[in-house]
Image: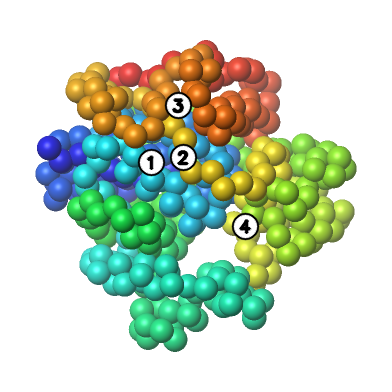
Amino acid sequence: MQILGIIAEYNPFHNGHSYHIDSAKKISNADFVITVMSGNYVQRGEPAIINKYLRTKMALENGIDLVLELPVVFSVSSAQYFATAAINILKSTGIVNAISFGSEIDEIEPLKKLARIKNNFDVKKEMECKKSFATAFFYYVKKNLPGYEKFLTPNNILVIEYLAAMERINWQPKVFNIKRKYCKHDENKLAKKISSALSIRNAIYNNIDISNFIPQNCLQYIPQNFANLDNASNVFHYLIAQKKLTDEILNVNEGIENRIIKAAQNNFLISQIISSANSTRYTNSRLRRIILNTILNIKKDTYQPQYLRILGFKKSSQSLLKMLKKNSSLPIITNIKHIQRLKNNFALNMIKKEIEATDLYPIFLSNQKFFSSNYEYTQPVIIL
């Protein structure tokens, strides 16, 4: 039996995601598809524009059989830790034997070579010249694998991290690469047929019709009350005043917290603070992650995934759920009310952080009156 794994954020789910799922299922001949999906917060350092339960419904209605959550402590981390955790979750299922990525080239082999280069990359040594990680790695590749630097595009870099993680943990599922079509990963304008998630989010923020760019069955899940990092600007200034932005926060080092605090003295909105504090070394994404981690109080740690959290599944795929329960090397969570059954304190701390982060999600909404504490305890697993 072929069980395909996909790592995604679906922020929001759009036609490009449908194309990837359909193409991957076809070329892999998959019987089932499991996705590891970021929850309410995503790797670019922002709250997901639409909450994780609505995005789970979008995924299940468009080709995914079962949705597992990537815990928030990984979903708001750097690309390496995001990718490593997601790959570990797929391996831990004990049933995923194939994996598909969306990249910007036809062949996977160049990205596999870059993954091997990545695993030999000495971060501290190469960053002595005060470059950002991405810039330092670009020049390292240019020196050690001339010509391959052209493959270091945003979408490809994450695929490289997935492949590097698979090599580090010695996991070798079948790999199916799907080339991205019609638009670039970071394209900020709507295209004719398939548009980037970034351009669709911008359209939602600006009340522009997106009905041509997402599956029709997803339109019902696009809320009027969407999330934006700037909506928590008041909260972030309060936390700065309370001296909560310290070097204990995830992704903070080299005194970068002082740069952010200085920028906040003359700017109110988080987006303005980021624009003021960024540099070639301190990218917008890294600054967003630091600010978001401060708001969520996510501190540095070395955890690996401690459980598999099921956000939703199809009724027609219940046999998949049975296989997962039989073969998983990690405990499975379907009901938050039962987390005390977890014997591992690391697992308990991780899921409690998820609960806290979900309770904070409403502060990012455009209409903050919609607040429901302990939401995780009242929201059941999505079954379609």
Under mark 3, the amino acid is: Tyr
Find residue 54 and report its horizontal and vertical position in percent. 44, 27
Picture quarter with the C terminus: top left
Picture quarter with the N terminus: top left
Nearer-N-terminus badge (1/3)? 3
Q: CA distance from mark 4 to mark 2?
A: 22 Å
Say which mark, if any, is on residue 286.
Answer: 4
Under mark 2, the amino acid is: Pro
Badge 2 marks a residue whose secondary structure is loop
Name the front one of labels 1 and 4.
1
150 up-or-down from 203: above or below: below
Q: CA distance from mark 1 to mark 4?
A: 24 Å
277 to the left or right of 76 = right
Q: CA distance from mark 2 to mark 1?
A: 7 Å
Badge 1 marks a residue whose secondary structure is helix
Find residue 191 and report its horizontal and vertical position in percent. 38, 55
Q: Which residue is mark 3?
A: 53
Find residue 39 and report its horizontal and vertical position in percent. 49, 35
Under mark 4, the amino acid is: Arg
Asked if disc 3 and disc 2 are in contact, CB closer than 8 Å, the reply is: no
Badge 3 marks a residue whose secondary structure is helix
Q: Which residue is mark 1?
A: 89
Asked if disc 2 and disc 1 are in contact, CB closer than 8 Å, the reply is: yes
| Identity of the residue drawn at 44% across and 86% down | 143
